[in-house]
Amino acid sequence: MPPFAGSHPLSHGFSRNSIDSYSNIVTIDVGGQLFQTTKQTLKQSGSKSLLSELSGLDFDGSIPFIDRDPEMFSILLSLLRTGNLPSKAKSFDIQDLVFESQFYGVEHLLLNSQSNPSQFEPFDLEKSLILPLSGRDSPTAIATTQLGEVQVAHGCKITSFDWSLKRKSTILTQFAGIDSMLSLSANVVAVGATDFSGLQILDVSKGCVNETLNWENVTKSGSTVQGIGASRDLLFTSFESSRRNSNCIMVYDLNNDGFRPVAEIGHYEIFGAELDSAIPATKLSWISSHNLLMAAGSHSGPSGVRGNIRFWDIRSGSAVWEIKENVDCFSDCTVSDDLSAILKVGVHSGEVFISDLRNIGNENSWTCLGDQRKVTNGKKEGVGSKIESHGTQVFCSKGGNLELWSEVLIGSSIKDRVFRKNSMGRAKDSCGNKITHFTFGGNKMFVTRKDQQFVEVWQSSVRGF
């Protein structure tokens, strides 16, 4: 029996049965169970969905029958009514609900209820899921989309998970190992390595290279990728020549199918012992509120760890601000539009520092949020630490732990800014494995650790499926 039974099949397969044309109430028989709802509720499913079409038809005498699971339909009907899944949805496998939502044409509503970034609750995170990876290689890069699709690089492979984290696929690449990866869409990623020439645009659904982008440097040698970033319209790639005697940042148009290059900034040719020019940018972050690109890089040498953070105006091609890192250079840094701030974790102190973007251009702009006395201890307590912002929250990894820093609103001036640390003890691995990467997608946080062949998924215990 087809899923919809009746004497006059429609475009979706159901028959012309019964709705009182003078009533707003719709009665539907799903798998032998009657449901009543309103036309307005069914229209919440979207104009192209089966249920929306059902709400717009005038039936003549009987009730439309749909040969599907009534319990799952009741869950999706609740989703239409409230925008959220009911608590009883936890008794079903998410993949079963995905398939059912696809049948009715409401997968976009299910996705929004489970992966809406506004539902991210930093103070209620717990490990809810493990994403296994094939082979023995640990993750070297991880990328996510806004709705929670995930791509994980491990060895020469990239494993992709859809937003439900149930469907996955793995492809082989030309790289021996991948160091940088950025999601451009659910199926397309930009991928590069420090020992392989060129930036590759990969279609992970087809396992093919759409395009390879290279920087034509003066020495005509290969160009390896040191970092990748993007704004809504532009793709940024930090290249270094294979001979390691020049570097630059290339800017490409994301709205052009051929990734047309639109600018070349931060081009440095290295002469003699000029260390600053020898440091390529390894982290690229777009600051939409200022229309600036943050490019940061560091280098470990005989005199210690040194680095610089530059802020580039793409239109003029010039750096409008530079922070030279000499005393407690960053182990990692990030920028937050929501906090209007730059943040770093010091390689020596392991402490978190903040610099207000409203102070842009000022010298000595860092303020230590932790113990200032550790800055000159020389112990390198912050080696390998990572820092990222998500909304108005700041996350910092130290070893196997995560710290959560939150701003306490006291006053309106820059000097009044106060942050408090909240230790996320539950984020510590039972074996003490060091956190190597963490990032955010949808309403979830994704964590990888040293010598582990899987990805941890952290989300709110309330919303976790």
Image (cartoon, helix red, strand yellow):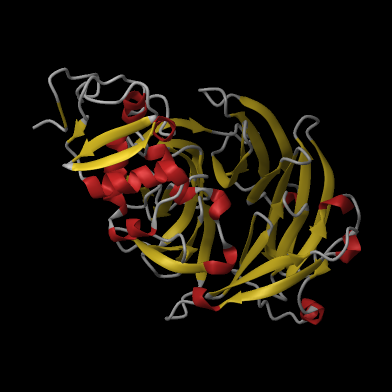
Q: Is residue 422 visible?
A: yes
Residue farthest toward the left in the current orientation of the protein: 1
Q: x, y (%) of residue 32?
A: 16, 42
Answer above or below: position of 418 versus 25.
below
Left or right: 169, with 113 as reference point: left
- Which image quadrant for residue 24? top left
Quarter of image, res 63: top left
Q: Residue 274, position in %: x, y?
A: 78, 53
The N terminus lies in which quarter of the figure? top left
Q: How many marks?
A: 0
Residue 272 visible in this rendered orientation of the protein? no
Q: Residue at x 23, y 41 (%)?
A: 34
Q: Nearer the viewer, residue 92 or 223?
A: 92
- The residue drawn where x is 42% and y is 49% is 151
Residue at the image position 33 percent from the left and 49 percent from the top? 75
Is 398 above or below relative to 210? Answer: below
Tell whether 59 sits left or right of 462.
left
- Above or below, 230 against 326 in this view is above
Which residue is drawn at the image coordinates 38% and 59% (left, top)?
Answer: 87
Q: Nearer the viewer, residue 57 or 230?
A: 57
* Front residue (pair 349, 264): 349
Image location of residue 172, percent across then percent down: 32, 45
The furthest residue to the front: 22
Tell me where residue 58 appears, x and y as whole percent. 30, 19
Q: Quadrant of the C terminus?
A: bottom left
User: Is 424 situated above or below 365?
Assistant: below
Answer with left or right where residue 332 lies relative to residue 424: right
